[in-house]
Structures are given as C-alpha cells and as structure tokens.
Image (cartoon, helix red, strand yellow):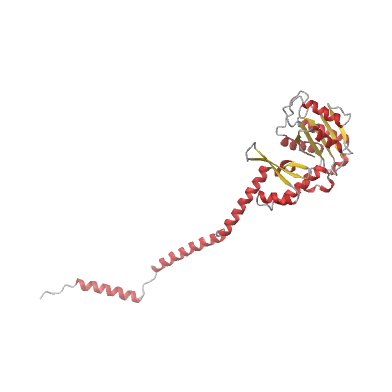
Amino acid sequence: MIGKIVKGRSFKGCISYVLADKDAKILASEGVLEVDTKSIINSFYMQSLLNPKLSKCVGHIPLAFSPDDKERMTDQFMERLAKEYMKLMGIENTQYIIVRHSNTSHPHCHIVFNRVDNDGKTVSDRNDQYRNEKVCKQLKDKYNLTYGKGKDKVNVQKLKGAEQTKYEIYHAIKTILPKAKNWQQFEEALKQKGISIEYKRKGQTDEIQGISFKKGEHSFKGSEIDRKFSYSKLNIVFNDSSYILEQQQEQQTAIPKATETNLIENIASGVADAVSGIGSLFDIQPSNYDMNKADALRLKKKKKKIKRPRL
C-alpha cells in the first residue's frame, strides 16, 4: 500500500481525470451531488468558496496496492482501507469521493477531497508526507498487506497517461544522475530524452527553491517523482560529486598514503642506522697503529717535562 499526496487548484481537472477512465467506479462519496461529473465538480467548487484565501483547495491521494493483494481487494475492502486511511490522516468533516481504477496491474483507488471542510476551515496538511508513510505502514501491518517492491519493479509499459510519464522520468533521472557531474550535464542529458527542467525561484530573486520535470504535457515536482529528486537533495548530490572529484584529483598528485608511510619508515630506519653507525665508531677497539700513536704522544709529553741542566 502506497499513498501519494497531491494538492492542486482545479477540481475540474482533477475530477475529470479521475472519472475519465471507462472502468472508473465510485466506491463512496460524501457531501457531493453524484448526478454526473459536472455536478460533482460544482459541489466541490461551491464549498471551496467558504475559504477563498486557500489557493490549493484540491486534495488528491492515489492509494496503490500490491498485485499480490489483488484477490483480497474487493470493492468493500478497498473502500474500508481508504476510509480508515482518511480518518488516520485527519481528513474528516469534508467532501470526498473514492474512485476505483482498473487500468493497471496493481489495484488502486483515488481519493479526492475538499481541503476546505464543511465549516470553511482548512484541512491541515502539516507533516502530511511523514504522516502518509506512517499511516500506510500502520494499515499494511494491521491487515497484513504486501510491502511494495519499489519503483524499479513497476512495469511502466502497463501504465497509462500521467502515471506512465512519471515513471519514465523517474527511470531517466535514476540512469543519468550517477553520470552527471553538474547541473548543466544533468539538464543536457535529460533534454536528449525529451525531459525539461523548470526551476521555482524565490520571489524576484535568483534563489532556487524547487524543481519540476516536464515531459510532453505532464509536469511533476521533483519530490512527486521521488523524495530523493527534490532540488535540495539533487543539489547535495552534485556538490558531493564535485567534492569527490576534487579529492580524487588531489590524490593523483599527492604521494599515496601507503607510499608515504613506507617513505617515513625508511627515513626513520635510515636515521636509526646512521645513529647506530655513529655509535659503533666509539665501540671499535683501538688497533696497533692507534696504540703506537698513543705511546708517541705520551713520550712527547715526558720530554717536555725533562729539565735541561744549566751550563
């Protein structure tokens, strides 16, 4: 079970997408008129007017389950899981629809809710990414659901629309990132695969706060593709790569550590040998030549001490 939190501004775009699939099935709803797609959109829109200051009033959470749990995923069980998820996430006292899709190999549903609740207050999104992971794990453990095998195991060919594009971008970034040494190389490599980068800047400054990846008509924030692909985390990767490269260049010009150690040991050994050699000079026993020389010196001193008689 994996939940993906998305916030937006257009109920029309979100609900039209969720209900466009021919096999789309509304499992449950609250506070909306289910005559047709248009009436559902209008229901959400009218309530959002209670809090016009909230720009991103659309809450959209796809819940995906492992193919291994497909047989267990009846409409009733999926609806139960979705409602428990919403309650644990604090999504209460507001409009929502739960729509099941059958267009992929893994069972999944879409929760669309109004972030403006029935009293005109905002449904909190504080730490929602963290809470999402915690709640999904809690429900997986409670109902013994299969843990996902990760994005790398997803069959992209069986996906459609925006979901397929998102996984295509994910695999492209994952392939290119280890080879790119800086942002320029990263952008150029993605461009060759039809993917462009858009940066979000702070006000009118050049300070970059976020990043989005676009392919075709679909665009995703870096963190929506994968949490590792936010601007801040990608920037850290490139900074680290530059640091590693500098370190490698320094190591190529410097004395290898092992060689340096051996050199120091050799110098120390040489000094020790030299000192030992110097000490050994004083340990040598005098030769016959040295003894004769010593005797000559003694005789010379004795001659100096002999007093000659006065005439």
Frontmost residue, 33 versus 273: 33
The residue at 46%/63% (across/down) is 271
Q: Is residue 257 above or below residue 305?
A: above
Taking the image as shown, residue 238 lies to the left or right of residue 134, namely left
The residue at 27%/73% (across/down) is 297
Taking the image as shown, residue 294 lies to the left or right of residue 29, namely left
Which residue is the extreme one toward the top?
Answer: 119
Q: In this view, does 298 lie above or below 237?
A: below
Taking the image as shown, residue 306 lies to the left or right of residue 129, namely left
Res. 260 visible in picture: yes
Q: Quadrant of residue 93?
A: top right
Q: Where is residue 3 in the image (x, y as percent from the top left)?
A: 78, 38
Q: Quadrant of residue 19?
A: top right
Q: Is residue 31 above or below residue 304?
A: above
Q: In which quarter of the image is residue 30?
A: top right
Q: Quadrant of the C terminus?
A: bottom left
Res. 155 visible in picture: no
Q: Position of residue 293 (x, y in %)?
A: 30, 75
Q: Position of residue 229 (x, y in %)?
A: 70, 44
Total marks shown come to 0
Which residue is the extreme one toward the left?
Answer: 311
Frontmost residue, 124 versus 278: 124
The residue at 32%/74% (across/down) is 291
Frontmost residue, 84 versus 54: 54
Frontmost residue, 154 versus 122: 122
Q: Quadrant of the N terminus?
A: top right
Q: Where is residue 86 in the image (x, y as percent from the top left)?
A: 79, 31
